[in-house]
Image (spheres, coloured by chain):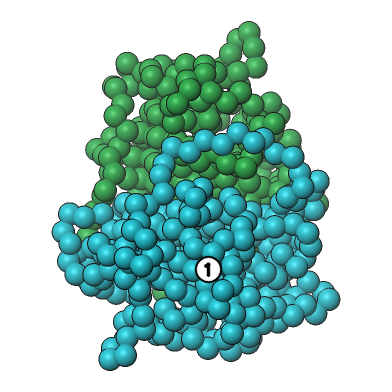
Chain colours: A cyan, B green
Amino acid sequence: MTFSKATSVAGRGDGSYTAEIEPGWDIFGVTNGGYLLAMTARAMGAETPGRRLASVSARFVNPSRGGSAIILTESLKTGRTISIIQARTLSGDRPLLTSHASFVDEGTERPAFTSSYASPPDLPPVEDCVRLMPAVDGPLPPPFTSKVEVQLHPDDAKLDQGQPGRMPEIRGWLRLMEGELFDPYGIVLASDAMPPAIFNSDLPLGWTPTIDLTVHVRDPGPHEWLACRFYTRFITGGWLEEDGEIWDREGNLVAQSRQLALVSR
Amino acid sequence: MTFSKATSVAGRGDGSYTAEIEPGWDIFGVTNGGYLLAMTARAMGAETPGRRLASVSARFVNPSRGGSAIILTESLKTGRTISIIQARTLSGDRPLLTSHASFVDEGTERPAFTSSYASPPDLPPVEDCVRLMPAVDGPLPPPFTSKVEVQLHPDDAKLDQGQPGRMPEIRGWLRLMEGELFDPYGIVLASDAMPPAIFNSDLPLGWTPTIDLTVHVRDPGPHEWLACRFYTRFITGGWLEEDGEIWDREGNLVAQSRQLALVSR
């Protein structure tokens, strides 16, 4: 099943949508946050046809265990160039996440000035990377890793190994399965599809629940391969952030993401 | 009037709050986003007493022109350690911003592990910085700059000067007036209290409306002086992000912020 099918939503005509959380998009039974947010953003986007997702911010309320979801959207503004929608995603009457998003009219003329003061990750060709595959004899990597193709930088692929003094970082190529291309909803998935950067540190491996996640989509695509870099600069007081930069193969910025997470006990 | 007084809210007992947007907290008549979000977060915090703001994400819907505001809060979760609240801030029936936030029980034991892979800005002592003062003979800096004490790094204080090839950046000290200390709501203000980093670039000076703003409060304080660094790494397709890092005088991270903004036409 393609990603777009797995995150499809059915409108009920009143701003509410139903969706099925498909099996396999979970880590230890908890649905992946990027998957849930992509599905939610798709419902919000259906409320403002012809405009593409530019930015979405979510706060995760309760873990999802799969099954059916309901997405309640509300349109706050339909401006000349930007629409603003908010949504609550529920499992029954249990809130899974709350979110708000901006969608933009791509036809609007915008300043063409482009300036970049950072570089894409230095990734070897895909064929020299290490593909992340579900474990056959243990819990990690989880089956979720079969839902996308993750090709890790060889230097970042030795997860679960103490590397004192090194900034937690994961770099790699990412693409969807079955030849599907990344659109803005796929880019939301991409922002949360790799192992936590913190796995490449001297902290013990553990669950790092996401508190909030924001994704800024700079280039809607379509994109095949994405060059991704996720890193954590600050671990303080039981919190850590994970920043993501996602690039296309030509070295153009596709998206930025940031999440706040709790450090595993 | 202190900042806390200027952002005070009055509960109506049903999760809704009224507030007065005080004069002077605006730039060319449009209320500062950090001020509005601080006021909103204060209302959300009143719904979960004893817990402190850890993270808030806002999306700005319509510009505020001052006057009275109504903040409608809704509690989504009161967990063992974290509360999640969302809010809509209105002027009459016109939405100004929508937001969601997490509040944490400080009494909860958290992992003490601290690790930082970035450094505070290299700021000279306050007395060697350049104080930002309202212009007496022009529009910039706006009167808002008198609401806080901004002491800019001398290298970053020559706003409105083309500096081709230099990453847009603003560094400086910040403190509240009248001896007031920064609490988490003040830190939200701090995340949006300095001139845009983009003013230190070769782009023309102009309005850069904020689309969304997220603030992660790592250390609730109280703090007197904050060492701030705001910078923009990517200007693409008419969008730019502004990342903020806020530190205490001892070099500990106090907060991170990120906003997405539109490039001025």
| Image coords of residue A44 (percent x, y) | 70, 66
Q: Residues within 10 Å of mark 1 (few under 14, many from 20)?
A: many
Left or right, residue A264 beside residue B255: left
Q: Which residue is mark 1?
A: A189
Foreground pick, A126 / B156: A126
Q: Is residue B235 above or below residue B173?
A: below
Q: Is residue B57 above or below residue A99?
A: above
The numbered mark 1 sits on a residue in which chain? Answer: A
| Image coords of residue B46 (percent x, y) | 54, 57
**Which residue is located at x 60 percent, y 10 percent?**
B136
**Which residue is located at x 62 percent, y 42 percent?**
B237
Left or right, residue A180 beside residue B173: right
**Which residue is located at x 74 percent, y 57 percent?**
A51
The reply to whether residue B107 is in sight is: no
Q: Is residue A196 above or below residue B265?
A: below
| Image coords of residue A180 (percent x, y) | 59, 72
| Image coords of residue A61 (percent x, y) | 52, 72
SS under mark 1? helix
Q: Give the residue at the far right of this rendering.
A: A13
Quadrant that contains the C terminus of chain B = top right
Q: Give the residue at the far top of this rendering.
A: B137
Q: How many marks?
A: 1
Q: Report which quarter residue B151 is drawn in.
A: top left
Foreground pick, B5 / A77: A77
Mark 1: amino acid: Leu
**Which residue is located at x 47 percent, y 20 percent?**
B163
Left or right, residue A221 beside residue A260: right
